[in-house]
Amino acid sequence: MGVNSVTSKGWQLLTQQVCLLDPITGALRTVNIPFHLALSDKKSERAKDMHLIKRLTTILRSREVEPDILESEAKSVLLDIKHPAIKKQALESLLSNKNAPVSCLTNITCALHDTLKQQDPEEVDAALLQLCSSQLKLLQLYTDIQNLHSGADREACSENDSLEGIEDELSRVGPTLQRYAQLTARPSVSFAQDSPDSSMPAQAFLSQMECTDDEGLRVIRGSETKWNHLGNFMFWGCLCGKSPPHKVCDTLQQAGISPQQLLSLLLSVWLQREKEVLQKPEEAVRNLHILLIALSDMKGAIEESWDPQSISPWWQQVRCTCIQSHNAAAALLAAFVAHRAAKASITSRADSKFQSEWEAVSLELEQWVVCVHQLEDVLVLQTLLLVPPPQGAAGGAAAQCSIKTLLEGGTGGIADSVSKWVFRHNLAPERLKEILQKREDEEADEELEQRAGEEGNEQQEEEKSQEDTDRTAELLVAVSQRFPHSLSPDLLFTHCCWEYVVQWNKDPEEGRYLWLAVEHLKLVSCPYIHLGISAMMWSTFIVKRFSAAAFLMEKVGKAPKDRLCRRDVGMGDKAVTSFLGCCVQLLQILMEADSAVEDVTPPELSVEEAWCGAEGPASLVELAELGLGQRGVCFTLVQHHCLLASLLHAAMSFSLRVKPLSLFEGKGKNAFFRDLTSIQLMPTGDMDPGLVSLRQEFLLRVLTGWVQAIDDPSSSAPGTKTPPLPSSGPKADWWPSLCLELGSLLQVNPDILRRHIVCELYNQGLDLRAEEVMLEVEDKDVLGSQLLVLTGQRLSYSLLHSQSQTQAAMELLARLPPTLCTWLKAMDPSELRCPLVPLSQTSRLVGRLIEILPENHAQYSLALHLLEAVDALTTEDNT
């Protein structure tokens, strides 16, 4: 009993099985027929063909087969296959094989083609015949191009192929091209499959080409790598001067490839092999000019019906390619060549219609003038961006720019690119300011762009680093000259400020980044930009962490430890201290800008004429002005936040115990962390005395912490000058003045703070610094009483508590008036942080006391007794 093929279809798709049903047991039986028996059947042509194609596959996979044997075997198999579909499959498999040489492919395809031609046309498969014809045409084209690149046939450059008209441009940008070439030639990671190669397997060539219905050829646009590989195969030999360009172009034209595709392939290889082009730019430019003219003369390149009043699509294709290219040098050289070729081509068309043609020339050339100018700008900018950062800098990959990316970056795109470069190079704000000021010196700037590419071979090795720095500065000046508006100092400082604050936000532990952002902001001269950018920085990056720090300190009641800072603020305790200091400076800039903005007019933003077509996001300055156009900041609210920031910074700097928000009453607390443009109810009138007392106590502890931080007893030695203090940190010289300023805002009597500073300085043994501050104290009577106690403590320590008491000191103590002796014994020298002070300093202090105390003062006589005692003790020490 038989079972048809439908039943067995799901078992084996490639074989036909015979199935039998056992009548006794009902079991289904199968009968397998050996393959060689199936081939003996006259009706098994398809099975034979499948066997032959497997045989062909085995031959093609073998790398040890000689080309002659491979050709013979493959031809035999291909001709033996009967079914057209399988024959076509076998031919395609052969043509895609990498081991088969092109001669083998050509001979086999030709043999198959001839066989098909000899058959009855009605029995021949049309698709198979068309495949043979098209592949033969492609193989012939491949062979012709390969033969032209073999070097056996070369063309001599004619006089018409000179660089007249381009030499000036090459001379002008030559030094920058040289510098650019040096920077792009630096070692980098590359892969073998990415390296350009002018050779190309026939199989790869065939896979990228196809015949069209009009007997022409069309290049299949695949991946960028394959496209560049094909362009290298066709044109690199011509660009190197090793192949005849006119013959190559004639061959490609006769094959029927469109000029537009050939132009695209030529430009792709030119841009891709920029490094090789820059090795011999003049020769490469000359060869490119020959090729470009040859392609332009092809039929269909520049249409005869082209409207002279419009832009030529052919030359527009070249411009579009250059505009999008990140290979700045190669794109500029291509533009030089195309500009000249376009001018010659369009001018040659001008005959009887001179006027209209002249208008067309002007319109087309205007586009080229703008394009060339933009590409020169891009070249100088890209050369700067390629300069590697010094060791230890932030690093990162160099930005790649093109006309397209700069236009899409908006009016601030150029400044944004340079600001990222400034960050990568860790260029100090003041150094950047110096460099930008150089472009105002016309005499020094005349040849800066040319000098930017010069080598310093004559410099000594130890001067190389400084030389590189100077050349980099010259490049930056050259860039700023080409972009006088887009890289105006205010615009560049603004973008640098923003770049640093963005980088700080990514890594808050790098407090230096935020500090540099504020330093760049300080260099901006326009109050409008100051105000807008400061407000944007505060709302975008600062206020969230600032409020977290304030609430954390309020919660723990003291300067928080590192672990808590990382948990709540997102950075360590040292970074928080630096952050709060930057907050104070930022808010001070805001207040200063808000006060100055009324006296100046808003800045007029302009852009270079060649770059006026920028279409992209608004620049930072535009965003800043847009924000201010709605409403300005509230000065009192900014001042309120600055006050809190100063308190927080002081608490962190000196590790003090304080609940900062508790130093403010209800209205003041509610106003914190609000939008700085909003109007808030602020505290007015006299504060609660208890609150003022808390504020005073905190400021006094800040001053005490500062005095302890600057402790340097040697600075108080007689006859020495007070050494300068640093400009930042707990030892900074501005802490006393800051506390006095805060005291006036917190309703704390400033004279109390001044007297405290004087007493603390004397307590620390810093007498000279104390004398400087003493001049500013108003209530000398109270200060005199305070210093009288301090003098008594010093003298008590010298006479009663010093381990080196002398017999003379004991005798002097016995001779003192009983009242003074009793008073000295009541003093507690342990309150002095520096009790061991030279008697000369104490004597000078008593002299000051006599000067500031009025004679009718209750303790004036006690001061006189102290003076006598100190003088006597000094006399005993001298003897």
Image (spheres, grey):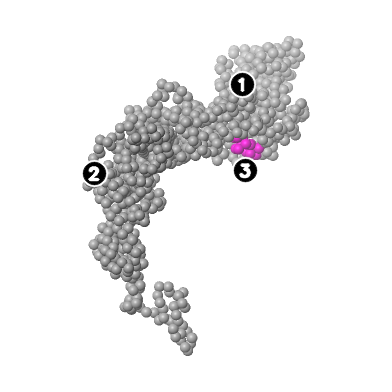
Choose between 133 and 667: the one closer to the eye.
133
Q: What's the amino acid at mark 2?
A: Arg
Give me the disc on residue 766.
1
Q: What's the amino acid at mark 1?
A: Leu
Q: Position of residue 221 (x, y in %)?
A: 40, 51
Left or right of 324? Residue 288 is: left
Give me the disc on residue 154.
2
- How many angstroms separate mark 2 from mark 3 (CA)? 74 Å
Mark nearest the camera among 1 and 2 is 2
Q: Which is more N-terminal, label 1 or label 3? A: 3
- How many angstroms separate mark 1 from mark 2 (CA)? 91 Å
Left or right of 642? Residue 196 is: left
Q: Residues within 10 Å of mark 1 (few under 14, many from 20)?
A: many
Left or right of 511? Residue 385 is: left
Q: Position of residue 311 (x, y in %)?
A: 42, 39
The quarter of the picture where residue 272 lies is top left
The quadrant the C terminus occupies is: top right
Q: Is residue 111 above or below residue 478?
A: below
**SS under mark 2:** loop
Disc 3: which residue: 567
For the record, the magenta segment spans: 536-550
Q: What's the amino acid at mark 3?
A: Arg
Residue drawn 31% across and 51% down?
255
Q: Residues within 10 Å of mark 2 (few under 14, many from 20)?
A: some
